[in-house]
């Protein structure tokens, strides 16, 4: 699942509830890594909206973690 906004992040977390804990943890780690890479891309391109959008998604996923 591609996470593009806060709603996507919340839906992703909801989808983890029916997964085994080990699988959910791996999926969560990969999603966080992907968002961090996306945020670095936006930082290199001085895209403040993108940075803020992904920061919000990261905050939600890391709080769940």
Image (cartoon, rainbow, N blue to C red):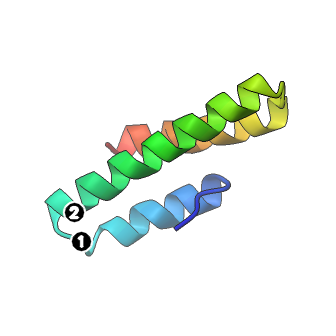
Checking the image for residue 40, the label placed there is none
| Percent of width and height locating residue 17 | 29, 68
Checking the image for residue 19, the label placed there is 1
| Percent of width and height locating residue 47 | 83, 31
The relative height of residue 55 versus residue 23 in the rendered view (above or below) is above
- Which of 2 and 64 lies nearest the eye of the viewer? 2
Disc 1 crowd rating (10 Å Cα; few below 14, some 14-19, many 20+) is few
Q: Which residue is mark 2?
A: 23
Left or right relative to 19: residue 62: right
Disc 2 crowd rating (10 Å Cα; few below 14, some 14-19, many 20+) is few
State which mark lies toward you, 2 or 1: 2
The relative height of residue 25 versus residue 23 in the rendered view (above or below) is above
Element under disc 2: helix
Q: Based on the displayed image, in which of its 4 quarters is residue 51 positioned? A: top right
The structure residue drawn at horizontal position 34% and vertical position 46%, both measured from the top left corner, is 29
Task: Give the Cα distance between marks 2 and 1.
Answer: 6 Å
Left or right relative to 2: residue 52: right
| Percent of width and height locating residue 1 | 52, 68
The structure residue drawn at horizontal position 73% and vertical position 25%, both measured from the top left corner, is 43
Marks 2 and 1 close (CB-CB < 8 Å): yes
| Percent of width and height locating residue 45 | 82, 28
């Amino acid at each position: 699942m591609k996470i593009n906004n806060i709603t996507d992040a919340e839906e992703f977390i909801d989808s983890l509830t029916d997964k085994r804990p080990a699988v959910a943890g791996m999926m969560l780690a990969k999603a966080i890594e992907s968002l961090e890479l996306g945020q670095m891309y936006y930082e290199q391109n001085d895209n403040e909206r993108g940075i803020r959008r992904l920061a919000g998604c990261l905050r939600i996923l890391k709080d769940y973690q």
